[in-house]
Image: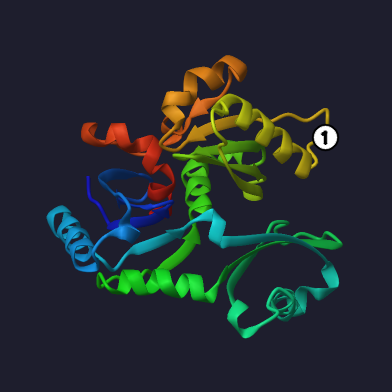
Amino acid sequence: MIYLKTSVGIELRGEDMLIASLQGNFSNGVFTHFKRIANYGQRDKESLRQEVLNFFKSAGLSMDTVVLGIPRKDMVLRHLDLPAEVVDNLKQVIQYQVQSFEPTEEDKYYYDYSRLDGAGTSKRLSILLAMVKKSTLDDYLRLLRGFGIRPVAVAGSSMGLANIFLHNHKDLQDKTCVLADLKASSIEVLALRRGAIAYSREVPREGDQSWKDLLLREVDEATSKIRLAPESSLEQIVLAGESSESAYAEIKAAIPDCKLMKSFIPGEVPGENKVHVQEAASTLGLAY
């Protein structure tokens, strides 16, 4: 098999930094390397730099194809419903929308957007607007530059999770699905509709609250927000994240059709990385 490229995802996930690499060919890829650096923000800068550099060197990874994934808490997502007449000036209209969120110079945002309605003849435009404070992202980029890394792209880690789920699953792109990222002490629920993120929210897990009760509550909230019709149904509920496998039996008892993300991972996963697939799913998805 001939590999054409190696891509690397770096995810800033709570207090930890996750690094995953994908060697890819035309259709699939191999999940080759993974590392989790705990409490990276509390580490001595030089020792952290050496640990990252040693990992890249020992794994033979390039720093030229890194995609950075930033936490959901740092992202502002807005769905905009605009008249189709603004399509020729869409960039300026979006810029005006962003400026409305910037009351001071300190609150300036980087932003990007995508159309969720395709390029059809609808009288309305559906836009997903993603924003992050410039000061926040600049701090993350400064951290990576200290390692000698200048990422080729920056995305919300949620988008990595959506990428890996939808990759090679065209049959699900016209369906409504929910992805639940069960982290160490919080859950993020993503609702995907027609191959795009229609809803995203992260909430903490409180005290002894069960993962099952938290997930059921958040799925109800997601379906309410996206206005899923009573006659419609969720095609799939998929669990990812470091807490997903330990919570799987409990959740499956309430949602028998739910699945783990590892059953949707395209490509090859060597034996030593199989135990990391669930926790690394969004990180690996950044590299797709």
Image-quadrant location for residue 53: bottom left
Outermost top residue: 253
Foreground of the two, 170 or 94: 94
Foreground of the two, 219 or 161: 219
Outermost left residue: 58
The image quadrant where one finds the N terminus is top left
Question: Tag 1: residue type?
Answer: Ala
Residue 274, compared with residue 128, is above or below; it is: above
- Image check: 37 left or right of 249? left
Taking the spot 83% from the left edge, 29% from the top edge, the residue there is: 230
Foreground of the two, 218 or 177: 218
Q: Secondary structure at mark 1?
A: loop
Residue 189, compared with residue 283, is above or below; it is: above
Foreground of the two, 154 or 140: 140
Taking the spot 25% from the left edge, 69% from the top edge, the residue there is: 147
- Image check: 220 left or right of 248? right
Taking the spot 29% from the left edge, 36% from the top edge, the residue there is: 269
- Residue 187 percent coordinates (x, y): 55, 40
Sort mark 1 into few (<14), some (14-19) or many (20+) by Cα contacts within 10 Å: few
The answer to whether one can see residue 226 in this image is: no
- Image check: 126 left or right of 215? right
The answer to whether one can see residue 145 in this image is: yes
- Residue 92 percent coordinates (x, y): 72, 81
Taking the spot 37% from the left edge, 69% from the top edge, the residue there is: 151
Residue 94, compared with residue 51, is above or below; it is: below
- Residue 150 percent coordinates (x, y): 33, 73
- Image check: 153 left or right of 258? left
- Residue 58 percent coordinates (x, y): 12, 55
Residue behind mark 1: 229
